[in-house]
């Protein structure tokens, strides 16, 4: 029965791996829709015998010790919802998780109630002498406004990633405003970048790994098609090959040399921007910053926001793009006095009230 667990690439899963994944999914289905799933409907859904489903349910009830009950109508439900088992952490591990959870408050898309409950529980297991340091975390790290659409999309995507199921996206590409595209994607991971989340996965339309901004996903549907991730794909290598979360699909990595003024250089030198970066303070107090990445739009705009505090030494095409942007700014802000030759922008003088 090859269509039971179709894959998009790679070898089929081993039977035991398939069964473990199926059992976890059955738990999820019954938790989400109590009394609706019967032994027959589960067997039909997974295209296996009712006898095999009975064995799976026995594992859930006796092996995992979950309180699985059956209605007279045949529908299954949990007397109490399944919960994760207790986990022991060292002090360093618990503190690291606590600080990571605090940082998560800055990311729109993480449900605030669940995150606050997790932070409170982590705080409760900390030693008493650390309690004063861990109070008022909400005031220290104010949460961003809640984005329920993003939360819903992220929840569906994370479930699909865990189940290794393809998803169908309704997506709005940034390069074609107003256009809606249909994409089937094998989701590999969702990663944060600044205040945004991005889905990384195999795009069936492009036959390549692509990045999708979660906020541009209008809708997502989990399919019944299982996939096997490309064994040659490495998420860390993929992210390292670009700047931030984006990477050029056509541009190869190249060495970029930037020179920052002493003031801006201090800010740049404090951060770890990329694994390939190298910095050197020059005799005149400026900072020479080298990094090897593709020149993507995200990187170019990172350079642009430093304005006159950053001089592009190489490559030439990045200097050319920045010069074009400077000329466009001159045309737009005609009240700003700009000497184009040196790209020197004087301070803006507001109009006085009369």
Image (tube, rainbow, N blue to C red):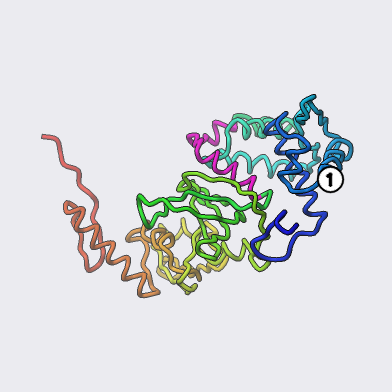
Coordinates of residue 58 in the picture (x, y in percent):
87, 39
Q: Which residues are magenta?
A: 137-161
Q: Is residue 268 left or right of residue 34?
A: left
Taken as a whole, is the magenta stretch helix, strand or loop? Answer: helix
Q: Nearer the viewer, residue 113 or 278?
A: 113
- When the figure is inspected, residue 92 is found, relative to residue 324, above or below; the finding is above
Q: Looking at the rendering, which quadrant does residue 123 occupy? A: top right
Q: Does residue 140 belong to the magenta stretch? A: yes
Q: Nearer the viewer, residue 273 or 278?
A: 273
Give the residue at mark 1: 52
- At label 1, counting other C-alpha atoms closer than 10 Å, the crowd grade (few under 14, some 14-19, many 20 or more) is few
Q: Is residue 216 left or right of residue 309?
A: right
Q: Residue at x 15, y 39 (%)?
A: 352
Q: Residue at x 60, y 41 (%)?
A: 155
Q: Residue at x 21, y 54 (%)?
A: 332
How many numbered badges does the structure rendering display?
1
- When the figure is inspected, residue 343 is found, relative to residue 129, above or below; the finding is below
Mark 1: secondary structure: helix
| Quarter of the image with the N terminus in it | bottom right
């Amino acid at each position: 029965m090859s269509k039971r667990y179709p894959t998009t690439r790679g070898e089929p899963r081993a039977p035991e791996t398939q069964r473990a994944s199926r059992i976890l999914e059955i738990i999820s289905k019954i938790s989400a829709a109590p009394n609706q799933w019967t032994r027959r409907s589960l067997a039909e859904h997974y295209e296996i015998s009712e006898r095999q489903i009975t064995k799976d349910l026995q594992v859930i009830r006796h092996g995992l010790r979950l309180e699985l009950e059956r209605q007279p109508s045949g529908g299954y439900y949990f007397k109490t919802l399944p919960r994760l088992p207790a986990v022991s952490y060292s002090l360093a591990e618990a503190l690291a998780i606590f600080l990571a959870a605090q940082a998560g408050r800055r990311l729109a898309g993480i449900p605030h109630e669940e995150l606050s409950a997790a932070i409170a529980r982590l705080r409760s297991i900390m030693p008493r002498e650390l309690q004063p340091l861990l109070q008022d975390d909400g005031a220290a790290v104010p949460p961003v406004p809640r984005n329920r659409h993003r939360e819903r999309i992220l929840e569906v995507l994370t479930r699909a990633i865990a189940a290794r199921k393809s998803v169908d996206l309704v997506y709005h590409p940034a390069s074609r405003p107003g256009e809606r595209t249909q994409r089937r994607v094998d989701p590999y991971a969702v990663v944060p970048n600044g205040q945004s989340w991005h889905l990384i996965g195999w795009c069936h339309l492009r036959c390549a790994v692509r990045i999708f901004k979660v906020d541009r996903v209008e809708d997502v549907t989990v399919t019944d098609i299982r996939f096997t991730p490309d064994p040659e794909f490495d998420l860390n290598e993929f992210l390292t090959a670009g700047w931030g979360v984006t990477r050029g699909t056509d541009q190869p990595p190249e060495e970029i040399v930037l020179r920052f003024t002493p003031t801006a250089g201090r800010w740049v030198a404090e951060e770890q921007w990329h694994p390939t970066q190298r910095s050197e303070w020059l005799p005149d107090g400026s900072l020479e910053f080298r990094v090897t990445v593709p020149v993507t739009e995200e990187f170019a705009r990172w350079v642009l926001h430093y304005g006159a505090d950053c001089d592009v030494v190489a490559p030439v095409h990045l200097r050319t793009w920045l010069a074009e942007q400077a000329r466009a700014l001159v045309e737009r802000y005609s009240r700003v006095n700009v000497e184009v030759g040196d790209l020197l922008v004087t301070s803006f003088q507001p109009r006085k009230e009369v």
